[in-house]
Amino acid sequence: MSFIAVIGGGISGLALAYRLRARGKDVVLLEGETRLGGNIQTRRRDGLVTEAGPNSFLDKEPATRELAAGVGVEGLIRAADPAAKARYLYTRGRLRSVPASPPAFLKSDILPLGARLRVMGELFTGRAASEMDESLGAFGRRHLGKVATSVLLDAVQTGIYAGDMDALSVGATFPQLSKLEREHRSLILGAIRTQKAQRKALPEGGSEKLRGALSTFEGGLETLVEGIARTLGPAVHTGAKVEGLVPGNGGWRVSVREHGRQAELMASQVVLATPAYVAAGLLRPLDEKLSALVESIAYAPIAVVHLVYAAGSTPPPDGFGFLVPSLEKRRLLGAIHASTVFPFRAEGGRVLYTCMVGGARRPDLVTLNEEALVTLAREELKELAGVTAAPVFTEVFRWTRGIPQYNVGHLGRIATIDAALARLPGLHLTGNAYKGVGINDCIRNAFALGDTLAG
């Protein structure tokens, strides 16, 4: 009974299992599906690399680099092409470039002049009147004004959460903004002071690694999953569905059905690294209130539509891609210029657009059939970006419960969940539903939990 059972083979469970093994602990990873990686899924065919879920990560997290190095794939990290630096928003009827500096912002047309001046007036805004959880939308309007919030801030959250900014918690989704307000009052002043402090803290000459570049792996994000799986070897069990947990004898009895055969394992500790709605089902017989809290974490549905165009049939798009604020009432959340960002993902000069549809505001669109989603994406690309050519290849992925929504009250909910877990010694939760939705968040949190469990 000396081993630790990790339930769930997404990036959180894989990173945790790796960390525990690296710290000298015996671990068994149980994944109910026949594949690992969760929503990290890469398809490779005929010189095309497409992602079903996350598309990239920012190369700034030490834990992610450590994991990649530990499983032998650090040398396969590929930064985005420098030509893809520009970003765009669709606002007021056309795509507009997102300015990269305060002077450029004042000269740009990303917002009307009055709205740009209101943003600069943020220097004189005050702190919140109370410490109650506040929506991202309300926070933005206090600091940046109504227009900038509905255009800029909404676009930023759309690219991460595909959510509703008047439902999302600012403290849970963008804790750095709350921290800047708390410590500096003004976000602009806080950002300036933070940048100065960071520059002073950098070692002489800077660092080659952790430069914060948008990155993926050669062969796609699943390259990292495959590296972890090779390293863990027989400790990984796929097709192993956990059906029940029972505490006893200082540990946990884990009931597993693996490839049709029933078995029971005795583990010293158990970590649920599954989506929240799966964890809730396993928690229900143990603590109904805890289960209900975990199950109450909402998810936004999302559809990913890949459109591939033959070389020369449409001009290669400039920049990383574009986002569409909800006030524009469009059916597209945004599009990534995937073949511009990572040219190796579409060989032979082909153009690859990755379009996002649905989200918290338009969940109905995700229920459309594949043909309808392709038609929608093509129509929106034509109207928003002028793409008139016919694609030579299309691919659709649907996630009916795609991105966890850290809505107002999320931080309080997590504190209550943590307190309830303390009454179930040896049982733990990790994953993107709780304390960060990104790949870096999942790996960092998994490493921290692994270190705690390893003592």
Image (tube, rainbow, N blue to C red):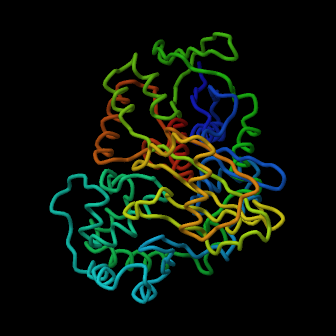
Q: Residue at x 66, y 67 (%)?
A: 388
Q: Taking 433 as reference, is 105 above or below it?
A: below
Q: Residue at x 38, y 66 (%)?
A: 153
Q: How many marks?
A: 0
Q: Residue at x 34, y 72 (%)?
A: 148
In the rendered image, the quadrant that contains the N terminus is top right
Q: Residue at x 49, y 17 (%)?
A: 245
Q: Taking 275 as reference, is 70 above or below it?
A: below
Residue 158 x %, y %: 45, 58
Q: Taking 375 as reference, is 266 above or below it?
A: above
Q: Nearer the viewer, residue 421 or 374?
A: 374
In this view of the protein, can residue 26 be seen by the observer?
A: yes
The residue at the far top in this view is 262
- Which quadrant of the structure image shows residue 317? bottom right
In this view of the protein, can residue 30 be seen by the observer?
A: no
Q: Nearer the viewer, residue 327 or 282?
A: 327
Residue 392 x %, y %: 76, 56
Residue 375 x %, y %: 60, 52
Q: Taking 285 as reference, is 28 above or below it?
A: below
Relative to 255, is 67 on the left or the right? right
Residue 315 x %, y %: 71, 74
